[in-house]
């Protein structure tokens, strides 16, 4: 088993491709390799005629704590920049429905990646956060474009500026998640929702998604480029003390 395979578990359940983030000792925080691994898994699911729906979840105590800061310190930042853009565009352009079932920490990229998911079930006691201003950087993963679309401009501004914690229940109330459910049921209910989608007319679901997301892929790509540039600008203003994806 390769390190990429260890970081992402892949299973198939009656037309549902289950992708499980699997770095529980690091709360499923992403390395650059993990970004590329998830992007590849999504591309493979998109091309597989036997896959009708993708279900995302995390192993261990959390869904995802964002980027692995230790790995970031040991890896060229440009590789992380490319990795995050690659996986976000794989999510944004994925033609089939994506369901996520999340629990525990849903932080940083763990939260921003879900902005590109179609149906999100969150544990009611999950803890969401967009921590970028506290880290000394700017929004990522196209969140400067997507978050206002989902929760509205004023609430998006508040969430991105304050870096505050959001409970799973509040995440559902704000529209970050579709529903909040008991933590011990979230994975089971996520699979049930995914399986329900496979019982419907797949072509109708795919075309509905395409209509609703028409033109978003290019907008998201441009937002990521702006965010990467701004992260570099913030890093320079903080004299190298900030957290930045790129020095460009």
Image: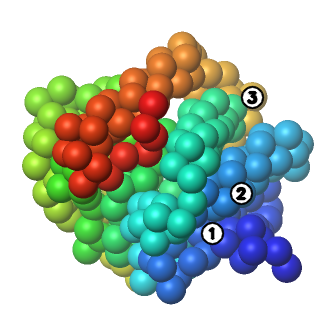
Q: Residues within 10 Å of mark 1 (few under 14, many from 20)?
A: many
**226 to 97, vertically: above or below:** above
Q: Which residue is mark 2?
A: 37
Q: Characterize the local packing of mark 3: few (<14), some (14-19) or many (20 or more) Cα atoms within 10 angstroms.
A: few
Between circles 3 and 1, the one closer to the viewer is: 1
Which residue is more in the foreground, 202 or 28?
28
Q: Position of residue 135 (x, y in %)?
A: 24, 56
Q: Nearer the viewer, residue 223 or 238?
A: 238
Q: Is residue 92 left or right of residue 184?
A: right
Q: How many marks?
A: 3
Query: Looking at the rendered structure, which numbered label has been put on residue 228?
Result: none
Residue 26 horizontal side relative to residue 38, left or right? left
Measure the C-alpha gap from mark 2 to mark 1. Answer: 12 Å
Q: Secondary structure at mark 1?
A: strand
Where is 65 relative to 247, above or below? below
The residue shown at (71%, 57%) is 37
Q: Nearer the viewer, residue 154 or 80?
A: 80
- Quadrant in which residue 235 is drawn: top left
Residue labelled with disc 1: 20
- Residue 214, relative to residue 3: is it above or below? above
Q: Which residue is mark 3?
A: 203
The quadrant of the rendering that contains the N terminus is bottom right
Mark 2, secondary structure of its residue: helix
The spot of residue 183 in percent (x, y) is 37, 78
Q: Is residue 158 left or right of residue 1?
A: left
Residue 102: tell me if it is visible. no
> Of circles 2 and 3, which is in front?
2
Answer whether residue 234 is visible to the viewer in this image. Answer: yes
User: How packed is label 2: few (under 14 Cα within 10 Å), some, or many (20 or more)?
Assistant: some
Q: Residue at x 43, y 38 (%)?
A: 247
């Amino acid at each position: 088993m390769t390190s990429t395979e260890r970081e992402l578990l892949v299973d198939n359940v009656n037309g549902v491709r289950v992708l499980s983030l699997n770095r529980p000792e690091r709360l499923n925080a992403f390395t650059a390799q993990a970004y590329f691994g998830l992007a590849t898994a999504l591309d493979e699911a998109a091309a597989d005629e036997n896959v009708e729906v993708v279900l995302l979840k995390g192993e261990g105590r959390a869904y995802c704590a964002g980027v692995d800061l230790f790995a970031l310190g040991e890896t060229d930042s440009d590789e992380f920049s490319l990795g995050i853009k690659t996986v976000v565009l794989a999510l944004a352009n994925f033609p089939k429905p994506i369901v996520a079932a999340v629990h525990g920490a849903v932080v940083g990229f763990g939260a921003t990646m879900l902005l590109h998911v179609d149906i999100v079930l969150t544990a009611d006691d999950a803890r969401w956060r967009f921590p970028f201003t506290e880290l000394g950087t700017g929004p990522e993963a196209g969140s400067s474009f997507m978050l206002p679309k989902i929760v509205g401009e004023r609430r998006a501004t508040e969430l991105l500026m304050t870096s505050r914690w959001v409970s799973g229940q509040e995440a559902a109330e704000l529209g970050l998640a579709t529903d909040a459910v008991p933590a011990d049921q979230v994975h089971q209910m996520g699979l049930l929702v995914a399986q329900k989608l496979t019982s419907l007319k797949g072509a109708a679901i795919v075309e509905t998604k395409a209509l609703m997301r028409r033109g978003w892929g290019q907008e998201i790509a441009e937002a990521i480029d702006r965010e990467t540039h701004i992260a570099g600008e913030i890093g320079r203003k903080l004299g190298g003390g900030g957290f930045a994806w790129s020095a460009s």
